[in-house]
Image: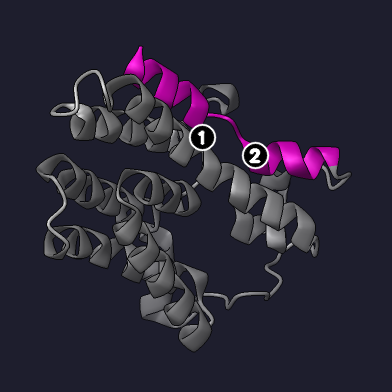
Amino acid sequence: MLILGGYLMGSIPFGVIATRLGGMGDIRQVGSGNIGATNVLRTGRKDLAFITLVGDGGKGAAAVGLAWLAFGRMAPATAPMACALAGGAAFIGHLFPIWLGFKGGKGVATFLGVLLAAAWPVGLAACATWLVMARLGKISSLAALTAAALAPVYAALLHRPAPTVILAAALAVLVFVRHHQNIRRLLNGTEPRIGANKAKTP
């Protein structure tokens, strides 16, 4: 139930819901076709992008929080493992949501939400890394990849429990896998900057 609940929670497509309710149609037909906040921002609706960001991050944090409520007092020794399983399942749910035919987003907001709930100092460090890199480079994917790469390092340096370190490392690998096209464009120098409109995909 822990893993299933986390997966179903992570499958909630806040980007799709927000853009449809906001009158912007199907976000999967806009820009890169991604359901995350960065692509929602390409609609020009910052409010919808913010709702997507909070929703995608919040569902990851909520999955971890519910696991902690269930195991934190009853079985404190196994609570980090329970939180890691629930958070990991929520992340997988975002990447492969059952409601969208298993075609989801890249998981950056959910990744950060999971980390903030599982180990808030690690999550804050990862968020700060994203903000600094986004400010300096103006490229969302580069900021996300940097934050993901450093998250397990932060977890280890801050002496978090082994399940938390493993969770951060596993999710970081998946973030890199989901950003393989972005990595290719970064190497080619063609990755769009934050706020730039990307042509609608055919």
Residue at image position (15%, 40%) is 163
Identify the disc placed on residue 14.
2
At mark 2, the secondary structure is helix
Please indicate whether residue 169 sits to the left or right of residue 128 in the image: left
- Residue 47 highlighted magenta (yes or no): no
Q: Is residue 201 visible?
A: no
Given the current orientation, which residue lies at the most extreme top position?
1
The residue closer to the viewer here, 124 or 140, is 124
- Reply above or below: 115 against 60: below
Q: Main secondary structure of the magenta part?
A: helix
- Reply above or below: 193 against 20: below
Please indicate whether residue 54 sits to the left or right of residue 161 in the image: right
Residue at image position (51%, 22%) is 98
Give the residue at mark 1: 103
Give the percent coordinates (x, y) of residue 97: 50, 29
Indicate which disc, 2 or 1, sits on the residue closer to the N terminus.
Answer: 2
- Residue type for callout 1: Lys
Locate the N terminus by quadrant. Answer: top left
Hey, which quadrant is residue 85 in on the image?
top left
Given the current orientation, which residue lies at the most extreme bottom position?
136
- Residue type for callout 2: Phe
Residue at image position (89%, 44%) is 23
- Residue 18 highlighted magenta (yes or no): yes
At mark 1, the secondary structure is loop
Give the percent coordinates (x, y) of residue 173: 25, 52
Residue at image position (84%, 38%) is 21
The residue closer to the viewer here, 140 or 34, is 140
Magenta stretch, residue numbers: 1-21
Give the percent coordinates (x, y) of residue 106: 46, 49
Q: CA distance from mark 2 to mark 1?
A: 14 Å
Please indicate whether residue 61 sits to the left or right of residue 176 in the image: right
Give the percent coordinates (x, y) of residue 57: 52, 47
